[in-house]
Image: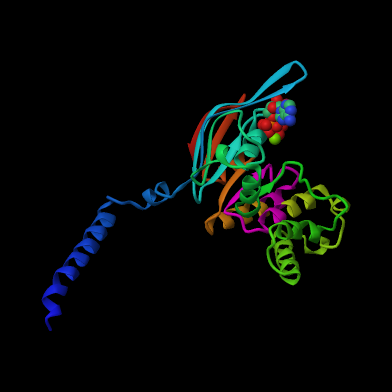
Amino acid sequence: MLGIPFMAPFWVILLGLFLSLAVGVVSGTYPAKRAAELDPVVIKLEKVNKTYRCGGAEVKAVQELNLEIRRGEFVSIVGPSGSGKSTLLNIIGCLDRPDSGKYFFDGSDIEGLSDDELAVIRGFKIGFVFQFFNLFPRVSVIRNLMLPMIFAGMGTRKHRIRSAMKMLYEVGVPERAKFAATDISGGEQQKVAIARALMNRPDLLLADEPTGNLDSKSSEKIMSILGELNQRGMTIIMVTHNEELARATRRIVSIHDGRMIGDEAVG
Ligand SMILES: Nc1ncnc2c1ncn2[C@@H]1O[C@H](COP(=O)(O)OP(=O)(O)OP(=O)(O)O)[C@@H](O)[C@H]1O
Ligand SMILES: [Mg+2]
């Protein structure tokens, strides 16, 4: 009985907090759109530069680039050929380091991380669909998919086979499981590359022209898979030349001569 007088103020405070939050949401103080803006920043580039030197020539592939991407975003990167899109994606995917500038992945300054630590990030957090697939050529499709799990020490063999088959069904090429990666068409290799990137259930999917070799029906299928993954919370960054596909994402970052020249919200 003695507890009741002391309990009352506690419940009053709790009720007050709840009411003020509810009134805030209803009155628009905390509109739904703000929720996305409050998601944590997963990628932060500050004045990033990358220059290639080939013979005597120098190519400034990425210049003074600033970019911030929050968890759950679906971003497309567009720009003409040679504008630095793949170079930028390789930096974001921790496959390459900037020459200067800062890159924070999930809050960690990657400059301070060893190559082994970057390999762990790539293995567990990032799925990469390469512009030219990078499938192991004489290895079967299903084994190509199982390799990231084997490298990451994930699951039993039975579990890996089941996950790989499930993913091949999702992208629509289960009947190619036992074919060598070189014995399937370019479009099929593209789908297998996407399936492989999803095998370790990454938080972040980086896709360099994921529909580049596909007919329009297959492109739509891939875009709907990416859209669904994004709906389920995956952060996706996709390089594309296709304006229509870029418009199907939520944000378009435009690159020219290694510099960001546009950053537009869509939809
Ligand atoms: N390993 C490398 N060595 C030397 N130069 C390179 C290297 N990789 C890229 N480049 C050059 O850097 C610039 C940017 O290349 P990048 O591949 O990032 O462009 P991109 O926008 O992806 O082009 P595309 O749309 O044709 O794929 C180009 O001029 C390219 O020739
Ligand atoms: Mg490229």
| Nearer to the camera, 18 or 209 | 18
Q: Residue furthest top?
A: 56
- Point out residue 84 in the picture as x, y percentages from the top left corner: 65, 30
Residue occupying image coordinates x 76% and y 67%? 161
Asked whether, in this view, residue 259 is left or right of residue 265, the answer is: right
State the residue at coordinates (73%, 17%). Answer: 57
Q: Nearer the viewer, residue 43 or 244?
A: 43
Examine the rendering and report whether any part of residue 267 can be seen: no
Image quadrant holding the N terminus, namely bottom left
Pinpoint residue 155: horizontal percent, then vertical percent: 69, 67
**In the image, is residue 196 part of the stretch drawn in magenta?**
yes
Q: Which residues are magenta?
A: 194-220
Is residue 121 something that shows in the picture? Answer: yes
Q: Horizontally, is 97 left or right of 67 in the view?
A: right
List x then y, in percent, for residue 136. 82, 50
Above or below, 211 against 99 in this view is: below
Residue 62 placement: quadrant: top right
Vertical side of 232 occupied by 204: above or below: above
State the colouring used for the structure image.
rainbow
Task: Identify which residue, 227 or 34, lies in the foreground.
Answer: 34
Residue at 53% over, 57% down: 231
Q: Quadrant of ligand 1?
A: top right
On screen, residue 260 above or below 218: above
> For residue 152, what is the image quadrant?
bottom right
Labels in figure, total: 0
Task: Specify whether residue 96 is painted magenta.
Answer: no
Apparent side of residue 176 relative to residue 131 in the rendered image (left or right): right
Query: How far across and how far down the image is residue 221, in percent?
Result: 67, 55
Q: Between residue 121 and residue 241, name the one nearer to us.
A: 121
